[in-house]
Amino acid sequence: MDRADRRQRAARGRVAGCVLLAPFLLLAASKPASSERLENEVAVFAALDKVTAQIDKLEVGLNETKQFGSLKITPRVCYSRPPTETPKTTTFVEIDEVQLNGTEKRIFTGWMFAESPGLHPLEHPVFDVWLTGCKKPTTSVSQGGPAAGETPPGEFLEPPRRRVRR
């Protein structure tokens, strides 16, 4: 097989690959780049006490604080998508631990993702807390609200943690 035959075969392979991928590329281009987000009033967490092996479902209203053991959990925002779209549920949460002397220490500030519970859960020697969902949708946020990774409105004592990609 000479050089011209090899070039011709390679060109036919590239054309065949383009023909096979064209419908998928057109389908991907027809979908909107960003989807509608729903703001919710309640964030739903699962919390595990490792000492007693007790798992609790915690439903916490936005900007309200609920205690689980020595932890105080305060969600700031909770976003989800309509049921007709691919699930994506996120919340920005602050978790404080009540110390033995009565003071509170911030041990977690950041985003949690229900579809990836292992990505940003609270991992504590005694407790684990992760997001499972949101409830009570209020409004739709198309482009207006903070995106995952941005700080939601409100004041925080500590800046949110940044995720480092490796």
Image (spheres, grey):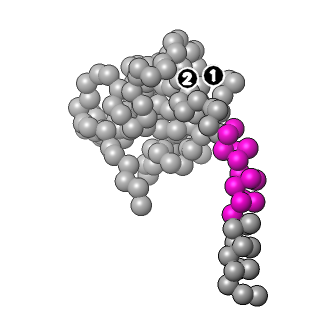
29 relative to 60 in the view: left or right: right
Cα separation, mark 1 vs mark 2, equals: 7 Å
Majority secondary structure of the magenta segment? helix
Q: How many marks?
A: 2
Which of the labelled discs sits on residue 36, or is there none?
2
Element type at mark 1: loop
Q: Amino acid at mark 1?
A: Pro
Q: Are marks 1 and 2 in contact (CB under 8 Å)?
A: yes
| Left or right: where 154 falls relative to 62 | left
Residue at (72% x, 87% y) in the render? 2
Q: Quadrant of the C terminus?
A: bottom left
**Residue 73 visible:** no
Q: Quadrant of the N terminus?
A: bottom right
Between discs 1 and 2, the one toward the N terminus: 2
Q: Residue furthest bottom?
A: 1
What is the magenta range? Answer: 14-27
Is residue 14 in view? yes
Residue at (74% x, 73% y) in the render: 9
- Within the image, what quadrant is residue 151 found in? top left
Q: Residue at (32%, 22%) from the top-left corner?
A: 153
Looking at the picture, which amino acid does disc 2 mark? Glu
Q: Position of residue 5 (x, y in %)?
A: 74, 80
The residue singled out by tag 1 in the image is: 82
Horizontal arrangement in the rendering, residue 13 relative to residue 142 (left or right): right
- Residue 26: name its quadrant: top right
